[in-house]
Image (cartoon, rainbow, N blue to C red):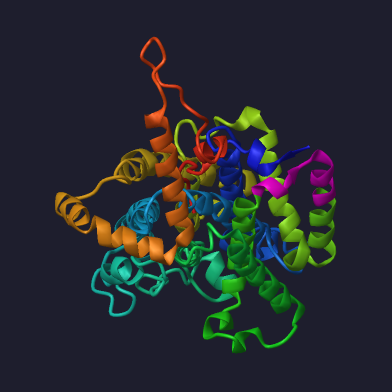
Amino acid sequence: MTSLKASFDPRSNSIGFLRWLMAFMVIFSHAGPLAGFYGGHDLGTQWSTEQSLGGVAVAGFFFLSGFLITKSKMGRSSTPRYFWRRIMRIFPAWFLVLIVTAYVLAPIAWMRENGTMDGFWNAAIESPLTYFSNNMWLPLMQHNIAEMGTSLPFYTIHGGFEWNGSAWTLAFEFGCYILVAILGIIGALSNRLIGGIIATGIILLAMMQWLGMGNIASLTPAFGDYRVLLLYAPFAFGILFALFGEKIPIDNRLAIACVLIAGWTYAKGGWLVVGQYAFCYLLIWFAIKVQFLKNWDKHGDFSYGIYIIAWPLMQFGAYFGLQNAGWLVYHLVIVAGCHIYAYLSWHLIERPALQLKDWTPKWLQSLLARTQKPRHAALDWLDPARASAKAARSADAGAVAAMPLLADGVTTTPPAVGGPDLAITRPRDGGA
């Protein structure tokens, strides 16, 4: 039996496939309310009273994100660099989808519905000209454009309209990034006990919320929104997997037990309290064990692009009656459209943005050079473990320099401090 820490290779795993699969779980789930399939309800709610298949997928996204992002922050990048990389992963593609929605999809849909562009650009309520600015910082402040969509299935079934109803999770995702940064600043990632207590506390609070134990909202106004703990809990579970990987076994028998637990709780109850965590274990087990899918994303990480464009494309298709073509045609067209968009988004926007993840403007390079000593002193004071690790590296480097030369002029080199696991603390940057 091997541990997660020993068996997980950030460069050789099936996480890319899992994120792609879960993006489409969200699509199939939303085809209920957006196209009128499955009785007009999210797929999965026919069997579970707690969560749709889309909600299951979102929990999986947050778990994998918690694991990968924490592993990344435990590397050697500074907190500003960490945030810059997260910004480059989230915002460029988000800006693009806002522009495409407001200035491509919505005008065509308006023309289709009204036969003229009159009243669109000068709409007094929910103007297309404010859709980007109102939503660019991730929280959705403007849900519709020009009061559209009153003839679509989503409006007739649920009495409302959203141009991008899946995107509400992005603000919570970035909030989780902030949580990881705070844990890093206070030393809770190097002192695993503190980080573990905080992550476990989040999970326990979420369990209490679903079990109706106490008034969780009285602890902080943030918990008044049930979605905070709904999404932070699987993310915190991912943090635990990153912190204590050497204590988590990757075992086939445990995976089988988790299949049974996840399936039973999804159908019978207890999914949000227990089942979703069994599902999360299955994800990491699958990512490690199913190696033939490790190159799934070799042409690009399309999962984020798929996730943020699927809902707008499904709403757009509804204006043209795509749902009337039947379940199979509907899904084939949406899947194809999402892939085309995600391919272009990755190669034209997301990948170029990620190539800037290590970029630093010259003026900032100069400023950092001048303030290096006081900054490092402050960081060492905030995080004593960081100072200890730096001292150990310096001592090791000094030992190497002091070792005698061999006959051929090569120094003998001792093993790297910390062992081979240091090589895997910086996984590939991935999606939300």
Q: List x then y, in percent, for residue 352.
A: 31, 41
- Please tell me which residue lies in front, 185 or 153: 185
Q: Main secondary structure of the magenta part?
A: helix
Which quadrant of the view contains residue 10?
top right
Residue 117 shown in magenta: no
Between 179 and 128, the one nearer to me in the picture: 179
> What residue is shown at x 69% (from left), y 40% (from top)?
286
Left or right placement of residue 148 versus residue 263 in this view: left
Q: Nearer the viewer, residue 380 or 203?
A: 380
> For residue 137, what is the image quadrant?
bottom left
**Location of residue 167 in the rendering, given as x and y in whole percent from the top left corner:** 47, 62
Q: Which quarter of the rendering shows the N terminus?
A: top right
Residue at point 47% right, 68% down? Answer: 162
Locate residue 432 relative to residue 21 in the image: left or right. Answer: left
Give how far across and how far down residue 398 sits, in percent: 39, 37
Q: Which quadrant of the figure has residue 87? A: bottom left
Q: Residue 105 in the image: x percent, y percent?
A: 36, 56
First to last magenta residue range: 245-258
Examine the rendered structure and indicate whether residue 278 appears above or below residue 333: below
Describe residue 99's horizontal placement relative to residue 138 as left or right. Answer: left
